[in-house]
Image: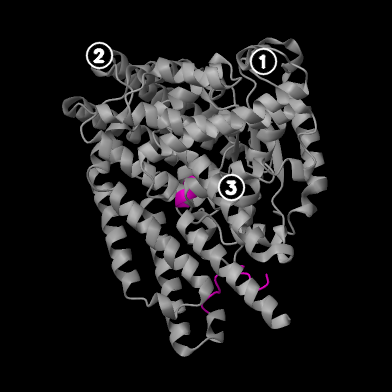
Amino acid sequence: MFGKPLLAAVMAWLLSACAVVAPPSPQAAGAGSGAQDEAATRLHRLLDASDEAALDRNPIWGIFRGDLRRAAQFGDYLSDAYIAAERRAADEDLAALALIARDRLPVADRVAYDTFSWSRLEARERNSPPAAMLWPRLVLNQIDGWHTFFAVFSSGKGAAPYRTVADYDNGLARIDGFVDYLDRAVARMREGIAMRIVQPRAIVDRLIVQFERFAAQGIDDSPYYGPIRNLPIDISATDRERLVLSYRAAIKDKLQPAFRRVRHFLVDEYHAAARDSVGLSALPDGADYYDFLIRSNTTTLLTAREIHQLGLSEVERIGRGMHGVMRRVGFGGTRAEFFERLRTDAAFRPTSAAALSDGYRAIGRRVDAAMPRLFDVSPKTPLEIRPTPDFQAPTDAAARYENGSPDIGRPGVFYFNTHDLPSRSTWDMETLYLHEAVPGHHFHGMLAIENTALPKLLRFDGNTAYFEGWALYAESLGPELGLFGDPYQLFGHYDDEMLRAMRLVVDTGLHAFGWTREQAIEYMLANSAMSRTDATAEVERYIAIPGQALAYKVGALTIRRLRQKAEQALGPRFDVRAFHDQVLMTGSIPMSVLEAKIDAWIASSRAASLQAN
């Protein structure tokens, strides 16, 4: 699970003409032969049993679904026993899956079968050496450590609900589990010192600042006090008094001392042992671990060298598009000079956080009006637009998305970052909204979660290549949705696409080819209009969570290639809305499974057309 950003891990663990809309339920499977019915029923029973067991081992993830049966539990996530249990579960699931005849399954259930097979093979490898020797000892970083995730989760504005007395008591119980986790993380990192498996010093410097901030926060300013600031009015006076005292005590007597302990460990022990190198290849078995992370995140067998070369090619292609925009606006200087103008001209800076919010809301209204051109379904879960929480903003991306939960009425949230406002730009707002909100993450995430006909595997599980690949593909739909008419917004699209292409170059450069942090930052500044603030944060993200950033471009290129294949094969019979249904309506699946699904859809669509004629 870990080694991915935690929000992605949540998504991954909880992460039409003959169109396959959803695998049928076991009850519906009886429409086929008896053997087909039996195979489908066995598959669904296995999927359900595996999912339930996974939630027993990972109770936090159930809360993201609105499943509160284990809401008082925090979970382990780090011990040798946990890793062994995850590996054993993967082995048992794969053995059971091998007893189900795939060729006897309905076509729709084969998507679930293949996705489950991929996910359990990935879990087995993640929880076996060499991967399982490294990730537990690199467990804290400034991007997706539990200390950042759990603060948002427990703030009253995250996934954990705070509506009843039981919700509040569950929150207190989880705080105890989180404190234990931090102490175990320190123990794991001490093991890492002895094994020479340690974080780069640049990452440790960021961690120290974060833990200093958390330790110094007053009770009233703590994100963990957020639920108390919004106690429901129907909670009795007696319970209100008890909860206020209990939460204040938990912050003062448990959380703050735990943050101080981690901070002291980082300053007094870990910083001196941290490494000057930044790439995984500098660690014992780090090169093999990086190869695994490439496979895990891209769901392909591409090598680091192939991805690096693909990135260089994409950087060159996108650069030509940038030059086209420069000519369109009459700029006669170099691309570097144009970048500098975009970085420094006050005309491209937001005047206030409120103006940034208003701008995103206006974009959202325009996109919503145009969506029926490309989609015939949309999520029922509402989307909210909010600024990134202050405690998270200094190290967070320019924008991000968090799934909603229909079962408990939590909306999807598009977060935009107002930290260091002068470094923020307005010319990339349209493409950021398309990626993080509609039709990007909000669409793929919520359409799957709301589709109760899907097995839980396909509603809640996922892989980075699919959901980040879809979001990057969604950016490319801007012209079809009436966006990018402003040449600077079009440049923003190219600039964000360039970011994803540069990631292929920089991530592999850092972890496979010996690039330095400074070399990577300079490469990004030379090839995009990013501010140094953003370029530094991006590079440090790739250092902290290797491989994850590769998935965007690989996934998007795959989806675009499959669309082109369908357009060529079906000609005038091609319906982009039907294509998008095919991509979206069976949840997050590996690229190989998606390609097989689209190939089958093309074949069935052509056959149906021939019969009609």
Above or below, 144 against 561 in this view is above
- Amino acid at dot 2: Ala
Q: CA distance from mark 1 to mark 2?
A: 42 Å
Q: Residue 386: image x %, image y %? A: 68, 32
The numbered dot on residue 272 is: 2
Asked whether the residues under the numbered discs 1 and 2 touch, taking CB atoms below 8 Å apart as contact, a structural biologist would say: no
Asked if residue 18 lies in the magenta stretch, the reply is yes
Tell me if I can see residue 602 in this picture.
yes
- Label 3 vs 1, first from the N-terminus: 1
Q: Residue furthest left?
A: 194
In the picture, which quadrant includes the N terminus? top left
Give the crowd class for mark 3: few <14, some 14-19, many >=20 residues within 10 Å: many
Residue 320 percent coordinates (x, y): 63, 29
Mark 1 is on which residue type?
A: Phe
- Label 2 packing within 10 angstroms: few (<14), some (14-19), many (20+): few
In depth, the one of 608 and 217 nearer the eye is 608
- CA separation, marks 2 and 3? 41 Å
Q: Quadrant of residue 485?
A: top right
Q: Image check: 155 left or right of 426?
A: left
The circle drawn on residue 530 is none
Q: Residue at x 68, y 16 (%)?
A: 342
Would residue 400 be counted in the magenta stretch? no
- Which amino acid type is shown beneath numbered disc 3? Trp
Most common SS among magenta residues: loop
Element at label 3: helix
Question: Which sits earlier in the primary sequence, circle 2 or circle 3?
Answer: 2
| Residue visible at 25% across and 32% down in the picture | 188
Q: Which residue is mark 1?
A: 338
